[in-house]
Image (cartoon, coloured by chain):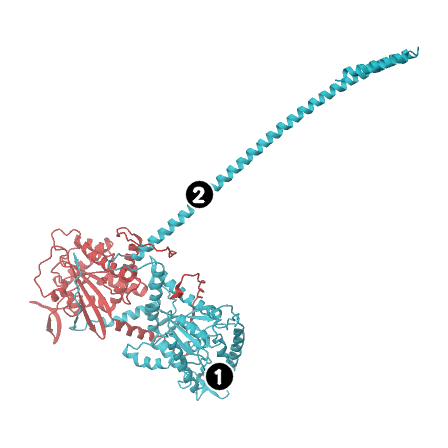
Amino acid sequence: MSELVPEPRPKPAVPMKPVSINPNLLGYIGIDTIIEQMRKKTMKTGFDFNIMVVGQSGLGKSTLVNTLFKSQVSRKASSWNREEKIPKTVEIKAIGHVIEEGGVKMKLTVIDTPGFGDQINNENCWEPIEKYINEQYEKFLKEEVNIARKKRIPDTRVHCCLYFISPTGHSLRPLDLEFMKHLSKVVNIIPVIAKADTMTLEEKSEFKQRVRKELEVNGIEFYPQKEFDEDLEDKTENDKIRQESMPFAVVGSDKEYQVNGKRVLGRKTPWGIIEVENLNHCEFALLRDFVIRTHLQDLKEVTHNIHYETYRAKRLNDNGGLPPVSVDTEESHDSNP
Amino acid sequence: MASNAEPEPRSLSLGGHVGFDSLPDQLVSKSVTQGFSFNILCVGETGIGKSTLMNTLFNTTFETEEASHHEECVRLRPQTYDLQESNVQLKLTIVDAVGFGDQINKDERQAAGRAARLVSSLSLHVGRGSNSLPECSALPAAPDNDGAVCSYRPIVDYIDAQFENYLQEELKIRRSLFDYHDTRIHVCLYFITPTGHSLKSLDLVTMKKLDSKVNIIPIIAKADTISKSELHKFKIKIMGELVSNGVQIYQFPTDDEAVAEINAVMNAHLPFAVVGSTEEVKVGNKLVRARQYPWGVVQVENENHCDFVKLREMLIRVNMEDLREQTHSRHYELYRRCKLEEMGFQDSDGDSQPFSLQETYEAKRKEFLSELQRKEEEMRQMFVNKVKETELELKEKERELHEKFEHLKRVHQEEKRKVEEKRRELEEETNAFNRRKAAVEALQSQALHATSQQPLRKDKDKKKASGWSSIYSVTIP
């Protein structure tokens, strides 16, 4: 430790340009085993995932989350109270669960926002949500800035926000637009059309088109954002999703019924059973694959590398609004260039 | 009101296949597209076989020129290569400590020691069966501070510089950590000279300095010069010395059941005795990498002959990721903590003031800048004052000179006037004299006329003469 006394250090040698050595490999070295090593390591440490659901009450948010993760993860199930009163202001309730599948442990946190959009006057009802999201960034930043910091900083930042659009069949409501405009800059928003079984196929596609157009006109960038497409492959894949499938029109259900000899999740109506995982009936399977099976890691990375960094840069740039910190001045050291 | 009610997360069982078990794959595929970087530092005497071992490990020929033995001080030479295997891209950086152990000390014992070392390395090249020159290890046992410091200091500085670069990037306001080319050293292969006796003091000192900064894996180089029994004793001796000196070498991790067993076994085989070779020799009916001697062939990949395979397993195939993680979470964090504490930051205690780091940094920066400004002002003031002073002085001098000049002028005028006066006087006198002369001459001529008549002239002359004198006596004041 005594080596770290400040003294002039010689300039390090500048590394030469990397020499590319490709097909000369005479035998197997074993570099690709690093993939396995990495996989094992991450499986051991486990993953964190925080998903937020926003929408008016009664749109089926909790049911959808339960269906997504095939277990009772939403707050309603946890608190055993289906007839809760609608709160007067927007509340933020986060509930964490640990689920495991195939040796992979995931700490899933579902953040519910009861009271959103339910009042007569819904002015600024997105503010508590924005505040909550920023608070999580702040927590992470504080941990990161510590001198002696934890090996693995607990990640409570919201990775994904599912925004539930009411299936009016007409267009987006002003509240929807306002919310998404404000929040698309701080978190990944995935717009979802709830209770899609109330629309016929034509109504559905028309509605989707209109919603897409409105989002574009208002400059709302939902996930996957165009600007973060890394390469051509990503771009084409994401373009397809952006222009055709999103916003996903979903139906949620946690009840099982017998259809054609199989037990499926569905909703039973007098005129038939709506199968949740049937692509002809609704796009739940698409949503699930998109969020969980292909883009889960990407959601986390965009949150960490882009939204969090934006917050951090902003926070470090303007010190306004911080309480003055009394620093006992020791002998002044050289400042960090 | 935000209420983060987070009770203990409960474990839930899933009702069906959700699909997030593909998460490690997603993560891994992201990493694969980004690529990996791995940085190895090779420390060992010149000519001990570092470059050859690297070539053997990675199955390629890295273009490196042989290092000379005449380096003044240890120089670190990093070289980066892009390797690819199946779909994995690795940015491998090999840092060579050139000139390690070559420095002569002013101490004359060292000079002899160096000569002995040179001879021993030459003889090792030749490849004598038994270890030679036992005196070689005895001589440098004397503590050689100058030589040692010159040897390990550049290495420590290089490692610190890489940490520093990473820290700087991390502290930036606009940073791009995921794009950053990580140059921190992940593993240090320390090459021990196969004397067969014990570690040199240089080795101990260097390893002690490095063990808190980097993962050290000690290896015995040119192991084909030691026989099996001697090797066994040598290994025990080395490990004993490391433990008794408190050197912490890298232990292969034994917490993951999959690799715990093999890692534990390998831990017992440290330090690995390796032989490197890029030449191929036909053994049986296969071409293998080996060294051919008149008495036999030392096969690199034969576990009975040397521990090369073990080293490769441990270094690359089993623990590469762990080495990278240890570097980041242990060595780098330690460096960061020390560096920040040294800069005067401290963690906020309890009542979280956010950004104590940023705040103190800003405050210190402001302090420093204002200090700078103050000094600048001071200097400017001083300069202005000095200028004024000099101006005054000059003015004074000018005035004095002027006065002098005036004075001199006046004096000169005075003198001139006096001289003028005197001149006038003299002129008058001359005129008077001339007049009188003329008068006298006239009288004289008259007298001459008169003397031609009578000798009474003498009386007249006398009279005149007396008359002259009386005239003269009158006129002369």
Q: Marks 2 and 1: which is nearer the front?
A: 2
Residue B10 position within the rendered picture, expressed as x and y whole percent measured from the top left: 16, 70
Q: Which residue is mark 2?
A: B381
Q: Given the current orientation, which residue lies at the most extreme left position?
A: A270
Residue B288 position within the rendered picture, expressed as x and y whole percent measured from the top left: 43, 84
Side (left or right) of B260 relative to A70: right
Q: Amino acid at mark 2?
A: Gln
Return the residue nearer the eye: B3 or A297. B3
Q: Which residue is mark 1?
A: B131
**Of pointers 2 and 1, the one earlier in the residue sequence:** 1
Whether residue A87 can be seen here: yes
Q: Amino acid at mark 1?
A: Asn
- Which chain shows up in red? A
- Which chain shows up in cyan? B
Return the residue nearer the eye: A160 or B378. B378
Residue A11 position within the rendered picture, expressed as x and y whole percent measured from the top left: 45, 62
Callouts 2 and 1 in the same chain: yes
The N terminus of chain B lies in which quarter of the figure? bottom left
**Disc on res. A170:** none
Whether residue B290 can be seen here: no
Dot 2: chain letter: B
Other residues around mark 2 within 10 Å, as few (<14) / some (14–19) / many (≥20): few
Q: Quadrant of residue A41?
A: bottom left
Return the residue nearer the eye: B53 or A193. B53
Residue B231 position within the rendered picture, expressed as x and y whole percent measured from the top left: 42, 84
The C terminus of chain B lies in which quarter of the figure? top right
| Residue at 79% from the left image edge and 16% from the top image edge | B472
Return the residue nearer the eye: B398 or B296. B398
Dot 1: chain letter: B
Q: Quadrant of residue B361?
A: bottom left
| Residue at 41% from the left image edge and 85% from the top image edge | B232
**Circle 1 sits in a helix, a strand or a loop, which is it?**
loop
